[in-house]
Amino acid sequence: MVDADELRTRVRRFLSEHDPAGTDRLDFLRARFDAGLAWVHYPVGLGGIDAPRALQTVVDEEFAATGAPDNDPLTNTIGLGMAAPTILGHGTEEQRRRFLRPLWTGEETWCQLFSEPGAGSDLAALSTRAVREGDEWVLDGQKVWTSLAHTARWAILVARTAPGAPKHKGLTYFLCDMTDPGVEVRPLRQITGEAEFNEVFLSGARIPDSQRLGEVGQGWRIAMDTLMNERVAIGGGNTAREQGMIGIVSETWRQRPELRTPGLHERLLRLWVESEAARVTSERLRQQLVAGQPGPEGSAAKLAFARLNQLISGFELELLSQQGLSYDDWSLRRPDSTELTSRSPGYRYLRAKGNSIEGGTSEILRNIIAERVLGLPAEPRTDKDVPWKELPR
Amino acid sequence: MVDADELRTRVRRFLSEHDPAGTDRLDFLRARFDAGLAWVHYPVGLGGIDAPRALQTVVDEEFAATGAPDNDPLTNTIGLGMAAPTILGHGTEEQRRRFLRPLWTGEETWCQLFSEPGAGSDLAALSTRAVREGDEWVLDGQKVWTSLAHTARWAILVARTAPGAPKHKGLTYFLCDMTDPGVEVRPLRQITGEAEFNEVFLSGARIPDSQRLGEVGQGWRIAMDTLMNERVAIGGGNTAREQGMIGIVSETWRQRPELRTPGLHERLLRLWVESEAARVTSERLRQQLVAGQPGPEGSAAKLAFARLNQLISGFELELLSQQGLSYDDWSLRRPDSTELTSRSPGYRYLRAKGNSIEGGTSEILRNIIAERVLGLPAEPRTDKDVPWKELPR
Amino acid sequence: MSSPNLLYGEVEQELRDSVRSLLRDRCDWTAVLARCESEHPYDRQLWSTLATDLGVTGLLVPEELGGAGAGPRELAVLAEELGSSVAPVPLLGSAVMATSALLACSEASVASEAVTTLATGSAVGTVAVPLTTAPDDPFPESVRAQDATLSGTVPTVVDLEVADKAVVPAIGEDGPGLYLLDSSAPGVTRTPITPLDLTRRIGTLELDRVPAPRVATGPRAERALHHALTTAAGVLASEQVGLAQHCLDSTVDYVRTRYQFGRAVGSFQAVKHRLADLWAGISTARAVARDAADALTGSSEEAGISVAVAQSYCCDLVVLAAEEHLQLHGGIGMTWEHPAHLYLGRAKSSQLTLGTAERHRNTIATLGALPAP
Amino acid sequence: MSSPNLLYGEVEQELRDSVRSLLRDRCDWTAVLARCESEHPYDRQLWSTLATDLGVTGLLVPEELGGAGAGPRELAVLAEELGSSVAPVPLLGSAVMATSALLACSEASVASEAVTTLATGSAVGTVAVPLTTAPDDPFPESVRAQDATLSGTVPTVVDLEVADKAVVPAIGEDGPGLYLLDSSAPGVTRTPITPLDLTRRIGTLELDRVPAPRVATGPRAERALHHALTTAAGVLASEQVGLAQHCLDSTVDYVRTRYQFGRAVGSFQAVKHRLADLWAGISTARAVARDAADALTGSSEEAGISVAVAQSYCCDLVVLAAEEHLQLHGGIGMTWEHPAHLYLGRAKSSQLTLGTAERHRNTIATLGALPAP
């Protein structure tokens, strides 16, 4: 198996052949992909060289050190984190070859059409219909909470193809062209005033059967794989002390002595300890992953992240007193990205409320820990074997 | 209907005929019962005069003011609070006449044989068997957490008479003679070291059918009535500020300035506010009861009582620091009553742990509030219609 | 000390019914949401109707001054209902703070005339202090009175943009005084602040040599301001109870009808227990808020500790209620087109209003002889 | 700053396995419960076996002084296992506190000789400070050294009744010093205190002109004591992790097999969510405890903040774990014949041991530049 030294050698060889400064950005990225130095743990020919996943950072650091262009990963988080591994795992050889390269280079970005107004935590209850017509599928329904839908070229999508089957068994997974005339994207305004997400309406949207991923009726299992990759992407991160929300309020505390009270001091220190403890816990998770002992602490990390963000942003308003009564800007707009530090404390307070809902609610995460980690029995279920169309909604 | 003034007149007339100082204690109490001034809301002939329940305090205060002997209610809390209303509500005329008078005067005290090692929160799962033999029932089984069993003359008891029926439908309610040779009482040592409660073993204990309360198979409904009376008895109380645990730690705070820290101050004040708020809430409940608007706040009062007792007694050990590492006396003994103030802080800490279990766990109380007050749906139940003997245990 | 009356009387229930019925017609949440981004974020017509049809804008004011001759207990019931609808009306500034302050200065005829205009709804008032001021805070010194004119700046004044009158605490040559400002006078600048609470507005008041009559001076002025702030903090507790109760009711309705996993979300035990705890918290909040309202009818010493207990309990509880409301509504609660954010903005801002919980606990430490280290 | 190693190494896992296997045979809870009311509440034989068969009583001690030549990381693993069994052995006083203190004084030959006796288990030691002393507390002044003898009283000394030696901080004519006391010397009185924690004993040490050699003086004595207390606070965090993990595991086992309402209690969502939260808390506690143990192998500056974070997190978490353990066992947990109370007594006492969470947060305020008002 390839080791870190060999990887470094390969990168240097590649750089000697492709001068980052002298090569067109896209050409450079395509060449990096073709050299197997995109995501090194992917197969040869699909951007990788079957190397251990943990060595990706070695490659990324080597490229970053030379100032080489990157693939702008923040604009395509869903493509890179969720669509790509799913296409790799479940796609046909043609699908992999068609989609992975432009996905990695950022030429084509992706979004995820899973959640619906009636199917949030209970994703398997979704009701968007896909009906087969010849070589195509015709889709009708509504998706919601879709980030990047207004910029994405493609979507991963799950739809119901067999309403008479039990809920988990009547779903099929598709790759959906967002430029199809049957796809309409509308901004979804949030409680912060801005529209970071979208609603997506599907009205007779057409998807060729060649863009079905996996077998008909296998959509649930594949969607679970996708979401598992989301959880892996959320965990990890070797960060420094006082990053994020706790850093913001600690700086305020230091710079504005007039705001200090004994009660706020006690609370600040408690939050500081919890934030530091969460940081060390994430670092331990990272070390476990690197050592090949993947632990289930990822779900706990997301729980702690949501809880602390909410507590600290609420605390910040109390600390600021009068300033906590104000807001910066309620106008409807598209944020560039979630820039917590550039917005007001009120924005941070409201935005953090979403942290315990998006990407798996805290309630669902606790269920997962209880059942999968602690082995506690599932609750009685009545919805598993009933035809979907007969379930109460 | 009788009013307060008329009641006062009656009491004074009674006192003019029965000098509290010159009459034998028991004779005085029996006469008070026979005059209908025992529990004024009971029927005439059974210790009352059908007066409104709220007027009982008027009578009690009148008697107390003259220094008249009382019926020592603390030694017979289960008799007065639970057995009596149940016998009144479900007993035959003979049972009422046989049991209520000596119960009220304290000549015969009572205990409650409901809980079992396998049936705590889920009382209806109890497995003590009662088998009919002629005019008697023969009982075998084990009861637990029985206070006063070692002093009580009688017990209210629920046993299973039809194991093939669904759990709630196979139970029957009895009045059990604690002097029966088939009844054995053993002290149950608690985590405090003492034995406030008992285990009661029933081995062929015999109960005449005339001591069955209500119909065969009606035990569950009657037991629910008994427990409802327990909840009423727990709520209420027009107490002063800083009673109970919060008063103890507030006094320590005032007298020992060397123990004070900013963090402990913050916590003390939070606990003080919560205790005061709980007191005002209980007072509001009392006013609602008096005004004939019984509210469901009784369950909330018990929840708050348990939570605060546990928080404050835990806080007390932290406040006391070194002293919090010690205990007063681990030896096995029978406490006279629950004297929180005369024991050490460590005892208070351990004893308070029981508050969220005894008399309905905090978890069960939350279920009750959610379902009966808020009208939230019950969870799916699988144990209601199955024969008891087939249930998993 | 006799027991406080912690229940609602018949008159109070009738008041509640009539206000609730009006709000149902005139103040549903879609209207509140639409208004909050309009040019007129306050519903002046609703306030007029409350004044003229129901006569509830002057509940504190004696009948001889044009009011309803009721008191803090009735005002607290009104606050519960307005809180329950996050109604965009100048309750706190006008009917509570300015009215209480002016009533305490009613020896000055200009003050009692002003009270009448507030009671009848023909004018709106406020008190020019930062909205975060606690009852026990020192008398404000940011406005100076000199040569019978006022100069200075006061940030986060509640209801400022609709206030015709403002009671201004200022320091003159002979110490503290309360002055009655006409907000249309020359030299007055009112600058709205973009608020976290879209249904209760704040602004910065700047005064540049504005003439204003003095309505109280010295210890009397200090007492009047303290009385107004204590009354407001006590009534705010009831507003918080009304808001929290709405959040609970709305959440219970939602989880009973929202199905996931083939079951109503409200049948999941973790959800049930959270709502049971919230219900218990609101029951407690209601009791202490009633206690505070009742105590405000009596002496100021009694009121001090009751109001401090009520505020320190209710101001955190209302945030919990609004946060649970949001979280248990899941994604739908996170959208602009759902009222959850209006309740959250009001709840969180009200937590900072008229003193935080810690500030009120400090009052308890003093009054209850539980000294800091 | 390189990343600390937060995992368990192979040697550490082997150490854990061998200790766990011994405790399974020799220290089940029925034995612990029976012993705690006997005349010999400590299990001296178990301690001897740990010393002689496993060689783990001297993990901190270099091999040339008769120890295992390991360090705080390995000692922390031992503490996890002993905490998991609430083993009645003098770990904290002897293998942690006295050993650390004496190692920091090892220039004195009497100190290094004493370390050897502790490492080999032939003697038991302690440090004569109140068990609640935090690492940053001022040097104790309750014992005076005069004419080469010690006099004074020290309450709540851990493991005192089985200690052959005690390191005594005392104030002499030339300032702070550490002295090595032989507890059988004339003038020494040891009085047991009835403990809340039945598995870790405390006592009052009275000294009346007892001769004892000095092993460190001045700043060196202060540093040695600070080092011993910091090490002990850090290792205690791991003991708390072991205890908390036991409480969780035992509760999970119980709720999976206890049926009420025809279902395993562990299938009720409110129970599941509480246990999920507890599991997350213990995962976090384990990470910070490992961080502290690792930091103790480095400089004292690095160790200071890591130990303070670990203690302030773990000392409250362990109480939560023991309290949930009790509550979720229902009635059975409230009986003497169930081990829940042994765990609760240890957990609650350990919360007060070597500084409360607030005390450690104050350390963080200083080291992390987050000053009090």
Image (spheres, coloured by chain):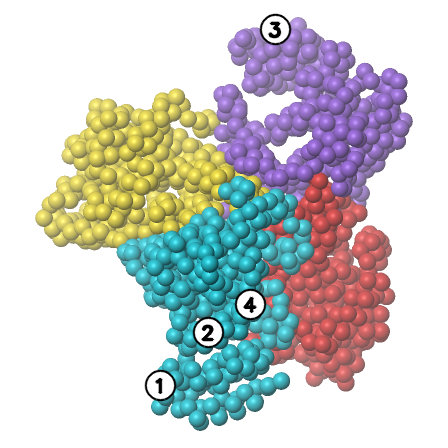
Chain colours: A cyan, B purple, C yellow, D red
The kind of secondary structure element at disc 2 is helix
- Please rate how many residues cluster around mark 4, counting C-alpha atoms within 10 Å: few if below 14, some from 14 to 19, many from 20: some
Residue kind at label 4, given as amino acid type: His
Between marks 3 and 4, how big is the CA–CA gap?
A: 93 Å
* Residues at marks 3 and 4 touching, judged by CB atoms closer than 8 Å: no
Label 3 is placed on what type of residue?
Arg
Q: Which mark is residue C254?
A: none
Q: Does residue B144 appear left or right of residue C110 in this picture?
A: right
Residue type indicated by callout 2: Arg
Tell me residue A282's x, y (percent).
55, 68
Quarter of image, res D175? bottom right
Q: Residue at x 42, y 35 (%)?
A: C289
Q: Which mark sits nearer the N-terminus, 2 or 4? A: 4
Tell me how far mark 1 sits from mark 2, CA to CA: 22 Å
For label 1, the crowd category at 10 Å Cα-Cα, with few meaning under 14, some 14 to 19 and many 20 or more, is few
Q: Which residue position is annotated with label 3?
A: B13
Badge 4 or badge 1: first in the primary sequence: 1
The residue lying at 50 percent from left, 23 percent from top is B293
Subunit of mark 1? A
* Disc 2/disc 4 C-alpha distance (Å): 14 Å
Apparent side of residue D51 relative to residue C172 in the rendered image (left or right): right
Residue corresponding to mark 4? A90
Question: Which residue matches tag 2?
Answer: A98
Would you name the residue on which mark 1 appears?
A24
Q: Indicate which disc, 1 or 2, sits on the residue closer to the N terminus.
A: 1
Question: Do the residues indicated by labels 4 and 1 lie within the same chain of the protein?
Answer: yes
- Residue depth check, mark 1 versus mark 2: number of the one nearer the observer: 2
Whether residues under marks 4 and 1 lie with C-beta atoms below 8 angstroms apart, the answer is no
Mark 1 and mark 2 residues within 8 Å of each other at the beta carbon: no
